[in-house]
Image: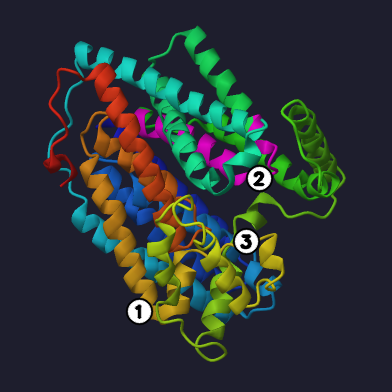
Amino acid sequence: MKGSRHLLELLIGGFVVLLAMGYFYSPEFEDFLGYAAILFAAVVPSAIWINSNSGGMPIFPAAALLYWVYFGVPTMRGVGESAGYSPQHVLDADLVVALFLVAGTVTWSQIFRPSRKPKRETAASFSTNKRAVIALIAIGLGMGISYYALIFSSFASLMGNANGIIRAVLLGPMVLACYFLGYGTAKKMFSGTQWTMIVTVLVAILLFQLGGQQIVTEATEVGAVLMGYTYTARRMPWVIILVMAVVISVLQAGKGEIRARYMGVTLTAQATPEMVANWFEAGIDTISNNKQHNSITDRAALLTQIIRIQQWTPDKVPYLEGETYTYLPSMLVPRIFNPNRSSSQVVMALLDVRYGFLSRDQTANTAVGVNILCEAFANFGYLGAIAIGALFGLFTGYFTRISSNREATSLPTLFAIAAMVTVLDLEADLSYLLTTFFQSSVAILALYAALRLAFGTGRPALKLKELA
């Protein structure tokens, strides 16, 4: 396929350029070795996926590339040495990351096997799919607007323990809507008026989300749009990516000042646009005047976490031996049914305190991301890193396989999209990831049932073999 060949050539060219950058910019030779190991382990899954005619949702390849961003790039920038660690400590940590990715690649590549040639899309199937996609986007964005209407209304205080499940049910389909905005744009499904209306509503929702002074949620939703477009069109929207990188960098630069300015202030829907405008102004001022701030590359870094956990375990603190995984069963029960359920960040807080990233009091207001690899090493060391890598590969490989050659609005594909969006949160522990995916899956099942009623009344019900 011409598109796949173009993607493979782009991947190889990008690998060579990034490897050269690592060689010239890494402060120590050990940094370059570690950087190269992560880069190679991160790129191989994408090459395998492209070489297999790009079948199924590229969940593991996308996640692997993010591991290069969160661990490889900080290595090249000398983050480890800046934090007081030796080049050998950095190399040891990088090799653990590469080991995790290799273990994941092995299991993912074994379970991910496209079994059929791609189906040709007929005019009739395109028309049905188009109506379903537009309906899914309308429902998803409508749910997003509904959630923020509740947040800014007098009913917000009444949600109480139900807020988590309400958020999952209403915002889960919104992420799907974002993905299908990219998909539909690549397929040229929308008229000019439809596209303008959809984007306008999405921008309004993103503005309301920025009222919470968080960037990760917005980046996830914009990332879903870009993934939907790239996966469908087989090309990268470089201009949009560059614009979003600039916007996120400006927001990250101004986040510290805007949080201090609006600390303790309850924002209303009317005041949110003004706050966002002030945020951009603060970010531009910080960058233009070279004020000290954490850049977006500093924000997307987990290198020092894995180094400290590797150095402290088990000499300074003993292995947890699976303790963090015991929270999962209770976390799967919605808080509305179990008011005493642990916080969704209980594992992160436990690890933050145990390894000195934060004090116990600080965890009440903030958190330091400690992802599934760091968590696994804290529990079982190198064996934990290999095991969680293998399980991660199995999980992502399964959803890649069931989404291979499926219609965009089929249930397996919807599950695969949810799985991709979930695992791309690299700062989450295993219990948080699985809880998020479970909540999203429940919302997707309800949404799928509604779509079938509206657009698939003559079609057979979902068979279990579709998920096998």
Q: Secondary structure at mark 3?
A: helix
First in sequence: mark 2 vs mark 3:
3
**Residue with the mark numbered 1:** 383
Q: Secondary structure at mark 1?
A: helix
Residue sitting at x 67%, y 73%: 360
Q: As shown in the figure, which amino acid type bears the numbered disc 3?
A: Tyr
The mark closer to the camera, 2 or 3, is 2
Q: CA distance from mark 2 to mark 1?
A: 35 Å
Majority SS type along the magenta span: helix
* Residue 288 vertical placement versus 203 (above, below): below
Q: Is residue 276 visible?
A: yes
Q: CA distance from mark 1 to mark 3?
A: 32 Å
**Residue with the mark numbered 3:** 25
**Residue with the mark numbered 2:** 214
* Residue 222 vertical placement versus 391 (above, below): above
Question: What is the span of residues highlighted in magenta in the rendered image?
Answer: 207-232
Q: As shown in the figure, which amino acid type bears the numbered disc 2?
A: Gln
Q: Position of residue 212 (x, y in %)?
A: 68, 42
141 vs 54, left or right, is: right
The residue at the far bottom in this view is 315
Quadrant, the N terminus: top left
* Residue 459 vertical placement versus 107 (above, below): above
First in sequence: mark 2 vs mark 1:
2
